[in-house]
Image: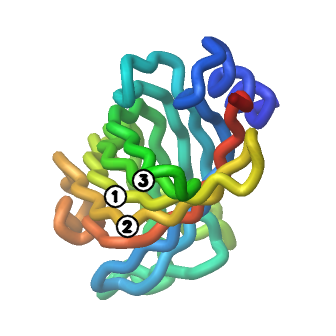
Amino acid sequence: MIIFFVLFTGSASGQDLNFGGPFTAFSFNKYGASLSVGGGGTFVTVNRFYIGIFGQGTTDAFKRYGLNEHEDMLLKSRQTGFWTGYNHKIHDSGFYVSLYNKVGFGQVYLNNSEQSVNYYDKTIILTPNIEISYRITRFFEVGIAGYYEFHTGISLFNYTSADFNSFGASILFKFKKSD
Protein backbone atom coordinates (compact mmCIF):
# COMPACT_ATOMS: atom_id res chain seq x y z
CA MET A 1 0.00 0.00 0.00
CA ILE A 2 2.80 2.42 0.90
CA ILE A 3 4.66 1.74 -2.36
CA PHE A 4 1.46 2.38 -4.36
CA PHE A 5 0.98 5.69 -2.51
CA VAL A 6 4.59 6.74 -3.12
CA LEU A 7 4.44 5.87 -6.82
CA PHE A 8 1.08 7.63 -7.23
CA THR A 9 2.29 10.71 -5.38
CA GLY A 10 5.42 10.86 -7.48
CA SER A 11 3.54 10.83 -10.79
CA ALA A 12 0.45 12.81 -9.83
CA SER A 13 1.06 15.96 -11.86
CA GLY A 14 2.87 14.37 -14.80
CA GLN A 15 5.94 16.61 -14.89
CA ASP A 16 9.41 15.19 -15.55
CA LEU A 17 10.71 16.24 -12.13
CA ASN A 18 7.97 14.42 -10.23
CA PHE A 19 9.12 11.08 -8.89
CA GLY A 20 8.41 8.52 -6.24
CA GLY A 21 10.17 5.47 -4.97
CA PRO A 22 12.04 3.65 -2.21
CA PHE A 23 15.43 4.46 -0.73
CA THR A 24 17.94 2.85 1.60
CA ALA A 25 20.17 4.93 3.87
CA PHE A 26 23.40 3.86 5.59
CA SER A 27 24.45 6.15 8.45
CA PHE A 28 27.34 6.26 10.89
CA ASN A 29 27.88 7.96 14.23
CA LYS A 30 29.99 7.34 17.34
CA TYR A 31 27.87 4.29 18.24
CA GLY A 32 28.36 2.57 14.88
CA ALA A 33 26.50 1.90 11.65
CA SER A 34 22.77 1.94 11.01
CA LEU A 35 20.51 1.04 8.09
CA SER A 36 17.24 2.85 7.39
CA VAL A 37 14.68 2.17 4.69
CA GLY A 38 11.90 4.39 3.47
CA GLY A 39 10.24 6.01 0.53
CA GLY A 40 9.06 9.32 -0.76
CA GLY A 41 7.67 11.25 -3.63
CA THR A 42 7.24 14.78 -4.93
CA PHE A 43 3.92 16.52 -5.31
CA VAL A 44 4.75 20.13 -6.24
CA THR A 45 7.28 21.20 -8.86
CA VAL A 46 8.11 24.67 -10.12
CA ASN A 47 10.84 24.83 -12.74
CA ARG A 48 13.55 22.60 -11.20
CA PHE A 49 12.44 23.10 -7.57
CA TYR A 50 10.28 20.51 -5.84
CA ILE A 51 8.49 19.67 -2.60
CA GLY A 52 7.60 16.16 -1.52
CA ILE A 53 6.93 13.82 1.37
CA PHE A 54 8.95 10.93 2.79
CA GLY A 55 9.06 8.43 5.62
CA GLN A 56 11.87 6.26 6.94
CA GLY A 57 12.84 4.08 9.88
CA THR A 58 15.86 2.26 11.26
CA THR A 59 16.07 -1.50 10.66
CA ASP A 60 17.82 -4.20 12.68
CA ALA A 61 20.26 -4.96 9.85
CA PHE A 62 23.10 -3.18 11.70
CA LYS A 63 22.88 -2.96 15.45
CA ARG A 64 23.85 0.40 16.93
CA TYR A 65 24.02 -0.23 20.68
CA GLY A 66 23.85 2.27 23.51
CA LEU A 67 26.55 2.59 26.12
CA ASN A 68 26.79 2.35 29.92
CA GLU A 69 23.58 1.11 31.56
CA HIS A 70 21.90 0.80 28.11
CA GLU A 71 24.38 -1.64 26.53
CA ASP A 72 21.61 -4.08 25.61
CA MET A 73 19.46 -1.39 23.95
CA LEU A 74 19.54 -0.60 20.22
CA LEU A 75 19.54 3.08 19.23
CA LYS A 76 16.85 3.55 16.58
CA SER A 77 14.80 6.31 14.93
CA ARG A 78 11.82 6.82 12.66
CA GLN A 79 10.51 9.91 10.96
CA THR A 80 8.01 11.28 8.50
CA GLY A 81 8.17 14.68 6.90
CA PHE A 82 8.73 16.70 3.78
CA TRP A 83 11.64 17.51 1.55
CA THR A 84 12.39 20.50 -0.60
CA GLY A 85 15.04 20.60 -3.25
CA TYR A 86 16.48 21.66 -6.56
CA ASN A 87 17.28 19.30 -9.47
CA HIS A 88 19.66 20.10 -12.34
CA LYS A 89 20.28 18.01 -15.46
CA ILE A 90 23.94 17.81 -16.51
CA HIS A 91 23.77 18.61 -20.24
CA ASP A 92 22.41 15.69 -22.31
CA SER A 93 24.30 13.04 -20.32
CA GLY A 94 21.43 11.44 -18.41
CA PHE A 95 23.00 12.56 -15.11
CA TYR A 96 21.22 14.83 -12.63
CA VAL A 97 22.47 16.66 -9.53
CA SER A 98 20.04 17.43 -6.71
CA LEU A 99 20.39 19.50 -3.57
CA TYR A 100 17.63 18.98 -1.03
CA ASN A 101 16.78 19.08 2.65
CA LYS A 102 14.55 16.63 4.46
CA VAL A 103 12.67 17.87 7.53
CA GLY A 104 11.45 14.91 9.54
CA PHE A 105 9.19 14.74 12.56
CA GLY A 106 9.54 11.58 14.57
CA GLN A 107 11.11 9.70 17.41
CA VAL A 108 14.42 8.32 18.54
CA TYR A 109 14.29 5.37 20.85
CA LEU A 110 16.17 2.78 22.81
CA ASN A 111 14.86 -0.66 21.95
CA ASN A 112 15.27 -4.12 23.47
CA SER A 113 12.86 -6.40 21.62
CA GLU A 114 13.80 -9.47 23.71
CA GLN A 115 12.54 -7.77 26.88
CA SER A 116 9.81 -5.75 25.07
CA VAL A 117 11.27 -2.50 26.40
CA ASN A 118 11.30 0.82 24.50
CA TYR A 119 12.15 4.34 25.65
CA TYR A 120 11.18 7.18 23.29
CA ASP A 121 11.81 10.87 22.79
CA LYS A 122 10.38 13.12 20.09
CA THR A 123 12.70 14.92 17.70
CA ILE A 124 12.85 17.03 14.57
CA ILE A 125 15.50 15.89 12.12
CA LEU A 126 17.08 18.16 9.49
CA THR A 127 18.95 16.29 6.76
CA PRO A 128 20.74 18.26 4.00
CA ASN A 129 21.60 16.04 1.00
CA ILE A 130 23.55 16.23 -2.22
CA GLU A 131 22.67 13.59 -4.79
CA ILE A 132 23.80 12.48 -8.22
CA SER A 133 21.46 10.27 -10.21
CA TYR A 134 21.43 8.63 -13.59
CA ARG A 135 18.38 8.05 -15.77
CA ILE A 136 18.50 4.38 -16.79
CA THR A 137 15.23 4.34 -18.74
CA ARG A 138 12.64 6.98 -19.61
CA PHE A 139 10.87 6.36 -16.31
CA PHE A 140 13.57 5.05 -13.93
CA GLU A 141 16.57 6.70 -12.22
CA VAL A 142 19.06 5.46 -9.65
CA GLY A 143 20.68 7.97 -7.34
CA ILE A 144 23.37 8.10 -4.67
CA ALA A 145 23.26 10.83 -2.03
CA GLY A 146 25.51 11.97 0.80
CA TYR A 147 23.92 13.60 3.85
CA TYR A 148 24.22 14.69 7.46
CA GLU A 149 21.39 14.20 9.99
CA PHE A 150 20.89 16.87 12.66
CA HIS A 151 18.55 15.78 15.48
CA THR A 152 17.03 18.41 17.77
CA GLY A 153 15.52 18.42 21.24
CA ILE A 154 16.61 14.98 22.45
CA SER A 155 16.88 14.36 26.17
CA LEU A 156 16.64 10.61 26.66
CA PHE A 157 18.43 9.38 29.81
CA ASN A 158 22.06 10.46 29.23
CA TYR A 159 21.63 10.85 25.46
CA THR A 160 21.40 14.19 23.67
CA SER A 161 20.83 15.23 20.08
CA ALA A 162 24.58 14.95 19.40
CA ASP A 163 24.44 11.22 20.19
CA PHE A 164 22.00 10.62 17.33
CA ASN A 165 23.52 13.03 14.76
CA SER A 166 25.13 11.08 11.93
CA PHE A 167 26.52 11.24 8.41
CA GLY A 168 25.62 8.77 5.72
CA ALA A 169 24.82 7.78 2.17
CA SER A 170 21.56 6.82 0.46
CA ILE A 171 20.67 4.77 -2.59
CA LEU A 172 17.46 6.02 -4.21
CA PHE A 173 15.26 4.42 -6.86
CA LYS A 174 13.12 7.00 -8.64
CA PHE A 175 10.15 6.18 -10.83
CA LYS A 176 9.24 9.09 -13.08
CA LYS A 177 6.73 9.91 -15.75
CA SER A 178 8.48 9.39 -19.08
CA ASP A 179 9.14 12.36 -21.40
Residue 36 visible in rendering: no
Q: Whole-percent x and y of residue 10?
A: 63, 27
Residue at 33%, 44% (x, y): give it.
100
User: Marks 3 and 2, Cα distance to the nearest angstrom?
Assistant: 18 Å
Q: Label 2 crowding class (10 Å Cα cut-off): few <14, some 14-19, many 20+?
A: some
Residue tagged by mark 3?
A: 90
Q: Is residue 81 above or below residue 114?
A: above
Q: Is residue 143 left or right of residue 104?
A: right
Its colouring scheme is: rainbow
Label 2: element kind? strand
Q: Is residue 70 left or right of residue 63?
A: left
Mark 1 vs mark 2: which is more N-terminal? Answer: 1
> Which amino acid does the dot numbered 2 rest on?
Gly
Q: Which mark is residue 130?
A: 1
Mark 3 vs mark 2: which is more N-terminal? Answer: 3
Tell me if label 1 and label 2 are in contact, CB under 8 Å.
yes
